[in-house]
Each structure stands twice: as C-alpha cells, then as structure tokens.
C-alpha cells in the first residue's frame, strides 16, 4: 500500500469518526431538546428512545423505582446509552410527581431537564460550528441545515449563514436564564421534599395497603400503582386532618 493510499484511508477514518460523533449528538438533540428546537410545544416521544428502555411508571416495577431513587443506577431501566437513560428517568419522575399531584416537584424535574437540554444544545452547536469553520463538510452542513432550514449552508454561503444562526441561537440563553431563575426559587424546598419521600418507601407501601384494606401494592407492583395508592393515601390523611380541625 502506497503512502498516498494510507493517507487517504486515514482521512476516511477520521471522517467516519467525526460523522459518528455528529450522529450521536444529533440523536440526543432530537430526543432531549426537541421542545427547545422549533415548535416549543413539541416534546420528545417514547418512540424517540430505544424500545428496550423503560420510560413510564406503568412499565417500571416499584422495586426498581426504589433502587434507582436511592442508588441512582439508571442501567436498571434497560439497555441504552447515558443520554437515553437520563431522558427516560426524567420522563418517569415527571409522570410520578404528576400522578401524586405534586406540581412543585414535577416542575422541578422539568426545569432540570430543560436546563440540561439547553446546555447540551449550546455545546452541540459550538461543536458543529467549530468543525464547519475548520473545514467545510457537506455532512456537517446538512446537520446545520436541519437545525436551521431557512439557511442553505452551501460552500458559498455557509460563513454568512453561521453568523445569522449564531444570533438566532442566543435566544436559548434567555430561555436558560428564565428556567434558572425559576429553578433557584424551587431548588431548596423541593430537594428536601424529595429526600423525605425517598426514605420510607416500605412504610408508605404498608400504609397504602392498610388504607385500601388489602395488599394492593407490593414491590413487584408497578410504580404507577404505587403512585395512585400514595395519592389516595395523602387525600385520606388530608380528609382526616380537615375532619379533626372542625369545630361544632
């Protein structure tokens, strides 16, 4: 093999490596920041994640939910990369807090996911820009065009297009600042509340079953069933509190 052929193979290998990295970043961008790109009402769907990753409370057993809540071992959710597992866990937590009607904790989870998505988009966008400025590449230009369809990113226009989209991307910084401000107000009280909830799962499960009059929730039950039982238990306690507080 000639030196020229070796150099060509090395360049092709570098190109494949760069494109593999871009494809990984693009997949994460689609699954985690879809609600930030384009239509702000659009959110990632279950189909954006690999089917082998658990993404809902109905799919997740209470035992696994407890283990992840305490130890943080997201690999228990199934086979997926770190991005997929983090995204799936955020969806599960958001659903869980919605089920038990804890709007503050649910919003807390949403804010964390939103800020992480914006951070990732900024890093991802900088990566693409720097790669394109270093050397024009049609694959990278195609990704940029997908993110900003109004611009062509041709060899003749890409430098000017980059200037325009950099200005457009700055609006996400304003979104981040808004989320961060809200997060700072919720952070302290919500963190304490989460810690309290994670301490006594078994005791709460016992109380749920006592309230229902039979063993409706076990460690093998779904997290959904546990959440519904917890909601009913909390409402029962609230009724008792209101009843005891009445005066004739």
Image (tube, grey):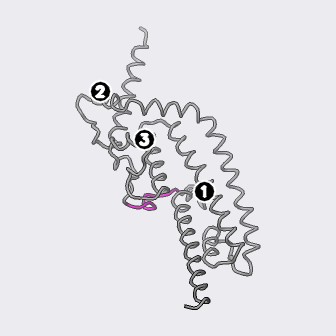
- CB under 8 Å between discs 1 and 2: no
Q: How far across and down, in percent of the image, does residue 139 sit?
A: 60, 77
Magenta-drawn stretch contains 47: yes
131 vs 196, nearest the viewer: 131
Residue at mark 3: 71
Q: Earlier in the sequence, mark 1 or mark 2?
A: 1
**Image side of residue 160 versus residue 195, left or right:** right
**What is the magenta range?**
43-51
Q: How far across and down, in percent of the image, does residue 205 sit?
A: 32, 32
- Circle 1 sits in a helix, a strand or a loop, which is it? helix
Callout in the foreground (1, 2):
1
Q: Quadrant of the C terminus?
A: top left
**Image side of residue 154 versus residue 112, left or right:** right
Q: How far across and down, in percent of the image, does residue 75 sit?
A: 40, 52
Residue at mark 2: 211
- Circle 3 sits in a helix, a strand or a loop, which is it? helix
- Residue at point 38% right, 23% down? 237
């Amino acid at each position: 093999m000639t030196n020229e052929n070796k150099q060509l193979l090395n360049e092709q290998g570098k190109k494949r490596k760069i494109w593999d990295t871009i494809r990984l970043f693009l997949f994460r961008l689609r699954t985690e920041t879809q609600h930030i790109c384009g239509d702000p009402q659009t959110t990632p769907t279950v189909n954006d994640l690999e089917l082998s990753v658990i993404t809902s409370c109905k799919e997740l057993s209470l035992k696994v939910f407890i283990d992840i809540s305490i130890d943080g071992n997201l690999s228990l959710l199934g086979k997926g990369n770190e991005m997929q597992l983090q995204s799936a866990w955020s969806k599960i937590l958001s659903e869980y807090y919605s089920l038990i009607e804890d709007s503050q904790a649910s919003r807390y989870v949403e804010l964390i996911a939103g800020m992480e998505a914006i951070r990732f988009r900024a890093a991802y966008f900088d990566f693409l820009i720097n790669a394109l400025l270093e050397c024009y590449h049609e694959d990278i230009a195609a990704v940029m065009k997908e993110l900003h369809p109004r611009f062509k990113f041709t060899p003749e226009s890409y430098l000017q297009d980059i200037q325009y989209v950099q200005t457009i991307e700055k609006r996400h910084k304003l979104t981040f600042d808004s989320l961060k401000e809200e997060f700072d107000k919720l952070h302290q009280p919500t963190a304490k509340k989460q810690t309290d909830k994670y301490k006594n799962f078994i005791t709460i499960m016992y109380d749920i079953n006592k309230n229902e009059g039979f063993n409706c929730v076990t460690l093998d039950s779904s997290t959904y069933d546990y959440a519904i039982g917890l909601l009913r238990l909390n409402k029962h306690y609230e009724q008792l509190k209101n009843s005891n507080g009445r005066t004739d």
